[in-house]
Image (spheres, rainbow, N blue to C red):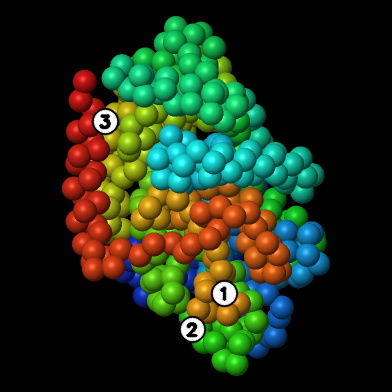
């Protein structure tokens, strides 16, 4: 048992599924991730809610977004937020991701932004991402946030020759339409300078990409937010939510918290019953991750990873991987569709096979960590940071689609601006709510099953 789980009485449930679960928390142990296993002593928090309280602002969720919201409310608006967390601090996505920060949010590429919104709006969105990355890098310089950053750009690796033309076109578009530093690397140059991924046929390198220790980033945000006066209450799930006379009444096991403004930052982990205006606005998607034992000098030489930067391949069901500072390999990908299938050994075997294809010298290597977690994917593949127009004082930031490590910092800042009554940029992710699938909602997982089979066929054919 690690230090973070020492006082948590409820065993971790590996089969938790936000689409079917009736409740989340309190008291659950953390997922058995590398990040939790190596994060060190448990950080201080403010303990569970133990009485009824009247506060200015409630933030629901203590992951990257929720803690960034609390931090920016204090730093930029002088508002001390009260953060409610169902289990331990950063229990969900923020301690189960791959630790990769890229210059994006959601699942769409820049060319798809242009198709959807036109060039001018796409350039505005790109400017938002550039500003967001600068904010993120600034937070990493805060002494309270010691998360082992490795800054060296992002490598987007062509896993088969057929994807190279599209990758080259995207790199050219980034340079010519957005003035952004992106360039192509041949297989030989990639092998010489970054990684000997035997599947690679080349890569696009983007100037912005940072790898971090996922749990240490979250706990750094916790320390920074509490240092500014925010209070963070773990094991305090919202079990009932009523709006009375313009005041939100949030019922937790220890008492009711009343506030005129509530910001939701739960990613994929909230149950469907949290609030009717949030139900089924995101699609929870499982992602699996493993970490190997420490690699030997001979193995390190064979895989030839000469960077700590984020590495992802061009599969739709992509692999994201990196060399950790202690010389372990981490790799992850999409996996099961339902929580009850999450522990199926086939998903672990698929990641073992991926390691063997990319790095034959590591075929059969021992794994020290294996876990999975839920990702919040919006139905149109882009996040939203917005007010709920027909619920006074309610706001949310959701739907990153697996690209939230970096942008969640800015999402928290934008969410704080909305809560404080300030204007945010006139961009699509701030002006509309997350779309709902309507009559198709009960069939989403059936559709996901069909799409996964299609994506796998497209990803793996020659």
The reply to whether dot 3 and dot 1 touch (C-beta < 8 Å) is: no
Q: Earlier in the sequence, mark 2 or mark 1?
A: 2
Residue found farthest to the bottom: 245
Secondary structure of the residue carrying numbered label 2? strand
Circle 3 crowding by C-alpha within 10 Å: few under 14, some 14–19, many from 20: some
Q: Residue at x 33, y 22 (%)?
A: 163
Secondary structure of the residue carrying numbered label 1? strand
Q: Residue at x 64, y 51 (%)?
A: 410
In the foreground, 284 or 290: 284
Q: Which of pointers 3 and 2 indicates the residue nearer the eye? A: 3
Circle 2 crowding by C-alpha within 10 Å: few under 14, some 14–19, many from 20: some
Q: Earlier in the sequence, mark 3 or mark 2?
A: 2
Q: Quadrant of residue 62?
A: bottom right
The residue labelled by disc 3 is: 459
The residue labelled by disc 1 is: 394
| Spatial CA span between label 2 and label 1 | 15 Å
Q: Earlier in the sequence, mark 3 or mark 1?
A: 1
Whether 159 is drawn above or below 85: the answer is above
Q: Which of pointers 3 and 1 indicates the residue nearer the eye? A: 1
Residue 240: image tag = 2
Whether 398 is drawn above or below 51: the answer is above
Q: Which of pointers 2 and 1 indicates the residue nearer the eye? A: 1
Q: Residue at x 24, y 57 (%)?
A: 445
Res 89 visible: no
| Spatial CA span between label 3 and label 1 | 41 Å
In the foreground, 94 or 392: 392
Q: Looking at the figure, which quarter contains the C terminus?
A: top left
In the foreground, 181 or 88: 181
Q: Residue at x 38, y 46 (%)?
A: 287
**Residue 285, horizontal then vertical, whole percent:** 35, 52
């Amino acid at each position: 048992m690690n230090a973070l789980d020492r006082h948590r009485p409820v065993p971790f449930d590996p089969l938790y599924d936000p689409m079917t679960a009736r409740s989340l928390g309190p008291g659950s142990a953390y997922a058995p991730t590398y990040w939790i296993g190596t994060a060190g002593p448990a950080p201080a928090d403010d303990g569970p809610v133990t009485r009824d309280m009247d506060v200015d602002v409630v933030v629901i969720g203590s992951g990257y977004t929720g803690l960034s919201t609390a931090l920016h409310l204090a730093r930029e608006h002088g508002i001390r937020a009260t953060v409610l967390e169902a289990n331990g601090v950063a229990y969900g996505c923020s301690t189960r991701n791959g630790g990769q920060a890229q210059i994006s949010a959601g699942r769409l590429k820049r060319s798809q932004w242009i198709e959807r919104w036109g060039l001018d709006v796409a350039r505005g969105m790109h400017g938002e991402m550039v500003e967001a990355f600068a904010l993120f890098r600034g937070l990493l310089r805060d002494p309270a946030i010691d998360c082992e950053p490795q800054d060296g750009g992002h490598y987007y690796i062509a896993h088969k020759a057929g994807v190279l033309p599209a990758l080259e076109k995207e790199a050219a578009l980034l340079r010519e339409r957005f003035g952004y530093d992106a360039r192509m690397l041949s297989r030989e140059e990639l092998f010489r300078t970054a990684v000997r991924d035997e599947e690679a046929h080349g890569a696009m390198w983007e100037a912005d990409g940072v790898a971090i220790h996922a749990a240490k980033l979250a706990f750094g945000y916790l320390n920074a937010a509490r240092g500014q006066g925010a209070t963070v209450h773990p094991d305090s799930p919202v079990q009932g939510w009523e709006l009375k006379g313009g005041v939100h009444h949030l019922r937790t096991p220890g008492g009711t918290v009343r506030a005129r403004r509530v910001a939701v930052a739960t990613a994929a982990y909230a149950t469907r019953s949290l609030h009717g205006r949030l139900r089924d606005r995101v699609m929870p998607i499982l992602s699996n991750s493993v970490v190997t034992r420490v690699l030997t000098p001979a193995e390190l030489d064979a895989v030839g990873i000469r960077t700590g930067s984020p590495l992802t391949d061009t599969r739709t069901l992509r692999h994201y991987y990196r060399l950790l500072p202690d010389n372990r390999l981490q790799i992850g990908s999409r996996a099961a569709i339902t929580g009850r299938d999450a522990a199926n050994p086939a998903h672990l075997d698929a990641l073992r096979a991926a390691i063997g294809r990319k790095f034959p010298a590591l075929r059969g290597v021992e794994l020290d960590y294996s876990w999975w977690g839920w990702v919040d994917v919006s139905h149109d593949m882009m996040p939203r940071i917005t007010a709920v127009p027909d619920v006074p004082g309610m706001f949310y930031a959701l739907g990153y689609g697996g690209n939230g490590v970096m942008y969640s910092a800015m999402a928290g800042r934008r969410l704080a601006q909305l809560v404080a009554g300030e204007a945010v940029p006139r961009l699509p992710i701030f002006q509309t709510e997350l779309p709902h699938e309507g009559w198709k909602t009960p069939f989403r997982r059936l559709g996901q099953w069909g799409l996964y089979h299609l994506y796998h066929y497209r990803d793996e054919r020659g």
